[in-house]
Image (spheres, rainbow, N blue to C red):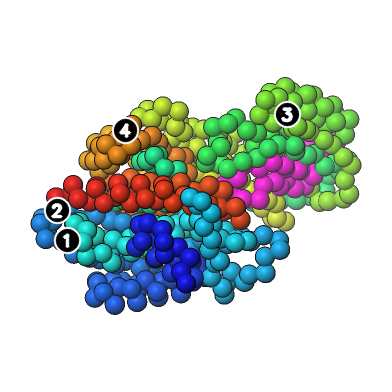
């Protein structure tokens, strides 16, 4: 017996339950992709499956809507797979155990995958129905969004998509329309170094106790970046005594603000280093007393290590002192929105080089490119090189958006108040498709999800019903 068969809208919850029976964690979406293709074949719908297992399914317009502009429905197949410590389920091989409690749906002992299973289910319900008026529907189902939007980035052929109006159903808060996001990339700066003996005392300097955070959504909170603060401390030490760098490192992910960073140095005057670090410890505790009250700077004796020569040490310290980091520009269209930023997320030292990896973000592609060029200019001046990885387009805010205007009109009639319009300083798939489909008019929305990506994840049934009604009315008005 189906667990969700009594829930309305029946079509949406039917396909959601079928999806949940198929393992579909990130990197494990072939089964869902093949299921989608089987769905299309059974209904004789035009369909495409690419080498990454992204799927596109197309349904022609219903009578009376033949001349209307097509609509793209977009969401991703994969889910974050987490389970409770006492849960024995193999999420790579087994489906979810669904349950209903009051007005919510959840999975026993695991995440639910409402992000973004509800988008898949709604799109399939629309493609399956024969009593819903609509323009040509182009449903785009991507893989591996949760681990870097890999499916959307890797989708090479979008020539079959005629639409330039996209409904993305990957938001988790009802009544919030997302209309802009940052594009981004990983820019890696590499500085070669030479090493030679130096007769100083070897010390470890550490900056730690910072909160860290997401370099997109939390870049505006004034949080300290341990790698950048380490550069500040080392530069101050180098002004008081001759200092040679042995190594410097910190951070684990390019998109996370580093909480701790350390350097091994050889100092001509160890007491001078200790005095500078004590002063910087007090200064940083004052500067970050609100955002990072536990920040500290410490010095400890270290073992041996062949240091870099004087030139290399100065170049690395110059880079860590002068590299741009943090917010670079705020949006002029949306008050309070960070438009452009970058984050030194990972700092590492190898025998012959130091590497600094920056997560660069902007909703304006030209500003993102400007930051890449600034990093390249600084790095090349210091004798190094840069490389850019995983670049994807930003989704720039459109002052004129007929789709947004229509959705606001329908939402306001249905709810009695206007929705919240927001932009985010993080990457979403809409930005990637905005780069692939010039002129794309796009809005991201969704039903209420709570505790997403945890074993307490809940999908609110009434919220799904309201979203479904709004989507149907919006399609109806798109003649």
Residue ID at (72%, 46%): 248
Gap in angstroms between the C-alphas marked 2 and 4: 28 Å
| Residue tagged 4 | 416
First along the sequence among labels 3 and 1: 1
Q: Nearer the viewer, mark 1 or mark 4?
A: 4
Q: Residue 413 at what x, y percent from top left?
A: 27, 36
Q: Residue 393 at what x, y percent from top left?
A: 39, 49
Residue 61 marker: 1
First along the sequence among labels 2 and 3: 2
- Asked if disc 2 and disc 1 are in contact, CB closer than 8 Å, the reply is yes
Q: Secondary structure at mark 4?
A: loop
The answer, for residue 27, to whether it is visible in the render is no
Gap in angstroms between the C-alphas marked 3 and 1: 59 Å
Q: Nearer the viewer, residue 477 or 79?
A: 477
Residue ID at (37%, 71%): 36
Label 2 CA crowd tier, 10 Å (few <14, some 14–19, many 20+) = some
Does residue 207 show up magenta in the picture? no
- In magenta, the rendered stretch is 243-268
| Residue tagged 3 | 293
Q: Nearer the viewer, mark 4 or mark 3?
A: 4
Gap in angstroms between the C-alphas marked 1 and 4: 30 Å
């Amino acid at each position: 017996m189906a667990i969700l068969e009594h829930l309305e809208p029946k079509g949406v919850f039917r396909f959601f339950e079928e999806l949940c029976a198929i393992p579909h964690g990130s990197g494990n979406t072939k089964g869902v992709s093949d299921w989608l293709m089987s769905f299309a074949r059974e209904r004789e719908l035009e369909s495409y499956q690419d080498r990454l297992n992204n799927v596109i399914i197309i349904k022609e317009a219903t009578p009376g809507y033949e001349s209307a502009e097509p609509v793209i429905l977009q969401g991703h197949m994969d889910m974050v797979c987490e389970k409770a410590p006492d849960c024995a389920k193999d999420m790579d091989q087994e489906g979810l155990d669904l349950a209903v409690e009051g007005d919510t749906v959840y999975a026993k002992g695991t995440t639910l995958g409402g992000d973004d299973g509800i988008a898949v289910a709604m799109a399939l319900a629309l493609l399956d129905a024969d009593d819903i008026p609509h323009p040509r529907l182009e449903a785009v189902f991507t893989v591996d969004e949760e681990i870097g939007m890999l499916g959307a980035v890797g989708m090479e052929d979008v020539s079959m998509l005629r639409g330039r109006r996209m409904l993305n159903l990957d938001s988790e808060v009802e009544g919030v329309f997302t209309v802009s996001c940052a594009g981004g990339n990983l820019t890696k700066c590499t500085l070669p170094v030479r090493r030679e003996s130096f007769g100083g005392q070897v010390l470890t300097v550490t900056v730690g106790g910072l909160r860290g955070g997401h370099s997109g959504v939390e870049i505006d909170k004034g949080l300290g970046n341990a790698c950048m603060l380490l550069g500040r401390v080392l530069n101050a030490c180098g002004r008081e005594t001759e200092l040679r760098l042995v190594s410097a490192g910190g951070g684990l992910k390019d998109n996370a603000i580093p909480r701790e960073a350390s350097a091994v140095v050889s100092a001509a005057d160890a007491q001078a280093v200790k005095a500078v670090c004590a002063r910087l410890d007090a200064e940083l505790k004052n500067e970050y007393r609100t955002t990072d009250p536990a920040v500290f700077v410490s010095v400890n004796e270290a073992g041996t290590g062949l240091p870099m020569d004087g030139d290399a040490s100065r170049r690395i310290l110059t880079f860590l002192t002068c590299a741009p980091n943090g917010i670079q520009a705020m949006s002029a269209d949306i008050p309070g929105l960070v438009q452009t930023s970058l984050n030194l997320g990972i700092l590492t030292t190898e025998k012959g080089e130091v590497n600094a990896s920056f997560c660069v973000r902007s909703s304006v592609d030209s500003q993102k490119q400007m930051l890449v060029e600034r990093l390249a200019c600084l790095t090349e001046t210091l004798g190094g090189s840069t490389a850019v990885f995983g670049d994807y387009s930003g989704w720039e805010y459109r002052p004129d958006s007929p789709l947004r205007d229509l959705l606001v009109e329908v939402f306001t009639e249905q709810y009695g108040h206007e929705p919240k319009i927001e932009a985010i300083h993080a990457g979403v798939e809409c930005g990637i498709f905005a780069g692939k489909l010039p002129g794309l008019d796009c809005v991201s929305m969704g039903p209420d999800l709570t505790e997403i990506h945890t074993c307490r994840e809940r999908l609110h049934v009434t919220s799904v019903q309201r979203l479904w009604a709004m989507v149907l009315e919006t399609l109806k008005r798109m003649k």
